[in-house]
Amino acid sequence: MRLVEAEFPEEFCDRVSKYADLAEAVHWRVSDADSNGRCVLRAVFESGEAQELVDALQTLLEKEKGWRIIVLPVEATAPKPEKRDDEKERRRKTLALREEIYQDTAAGAELTGDFLILTALSTIVAAIGMSSNNMAVVIGAMVIAPLLGPVLAFAFAAAIGDLGLLLRAAKTALTGLALGALLAVVIGAGFEVDFASDELTVRTQLGLDAVVLALASGAAAALSISAGLPGALVGVMVAVALLPPSAAAGLYLGGGDFENALRAGMLLTVNVVCVNLAALAVFAYKGVRPRTWLERVAAGRATRVNAAVLVLLLALLTAVILIAR
């Protein structure tokens, strides 16, 4: 459940009350105006609802000053809300508010020192694990890899047509992958690496199972964030698709094995395309879209273009995989 609290000028009291009534909240009330002429709306909603009210309030108040909307999680409420056994209730999707998703994904798109340090550490751990053929160490590297943030931010930005967020996410993701690959090159060139280990050679094997894994990873990540669920474990799944191939490509490149470096790099490219394509599809299915009609038109066009490019790249890479096998 969610608590939506909005502060706004007194002259909007009647219209806000009408919007709250139409939104079918579990409970709502609008306070009387205070000495500064400000009113407060408090409305409790079931999970998956409240987006219409939040959108309506933003549209109503966006040209005003001094208004604020706050969304808080509700752990429990009494009395227990009545279940609605109607068609709307049966077909309602569980969906986090757009603003909640943006808050979660935008933070992951920032290129920070912590992101770079965690990327470097996870790459070193992954390189050691693959060289020593230690699966447990490789999994540990996936746990600390911070790659879920920029990947989801990129797909979410494409879904809502936010070019600024998309560029920040792309910059962060590419920087992280480049840093990981560069560190792996240094490790491969300057340290003794067992290039015949199973954990390393498996990252050079191109097959359709890699496509399925990456698609499942991207879909699971987008589903978790759009439903407002913790994404830590899903982040490990995304890291599995991205970090090991990147590190393997760098290790082979540092060791002078350009053929296997190319194969690992191709696997990485396939995984990046698949993760983003699946996440974009899930956001579209869940109805994640901008607030205004004009923004929706622009975002819809951008989403179709991005999806078409990703599908084309996936088709080409899949063809290359089938030929190279």
Image (cartoon, rainbow, N blue to C red):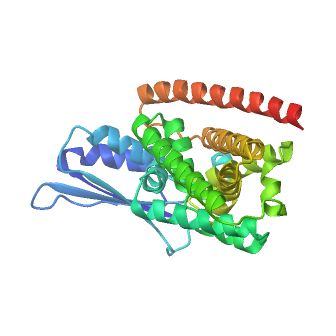
In the displayed structure image, the side of residue 52 where residue 235 appears, left or right: right
Residue 186 falls in image quadrant = bottom right
**Residue 250 placement (x, y as % from top left):** 65, 52
Is residue 48 among the parts visible in the rendering? no
Number of callouts: 0
Q: Nearer the viewer, residue 92 or 106?
A: 106
- Residue depicted at 78% across the width and 43% down the height: 211
- Residue depicted at 55% across the width and 67% down the height: 121
Residue reaching furthest to the right: 325
- Vertical position of residue 227 compared to residue 323: above or below: below
Residue reaching furthest to the left: 35
**Residue 229 placement (x, y as % from top left):** 59, 62
- Vertical position of residue 52 compared to residue 75: above or below: above
Is residue 300 among the parts visible in the rendering? yes
**Residue 27 placement (x, y as % from top left):** 44, 62
In the displayed structure image, the side of residue 225 where residue 63 appears, left or right: left
The C terminus - image quarter = top right
Residue 35 falls in image quadrant = bottom left
Q: Nearer the viewer, residue 89 or 290?
A: 290
**Residue 126 placement (x, y as % from top left):** 67, 65
- Vertical position of residue 207 compared to residue 243: above or below: above
Q: Nearer the viewer, residue 134 or 169?
A: 134
- Residue depicted at 41% across the width and 53% down the height: 110
- Vertical position of residue 210 compared to residue 229: above or below: above
In the displayed structure image, the side of residue 134 where residue 161 appears, left or right: left
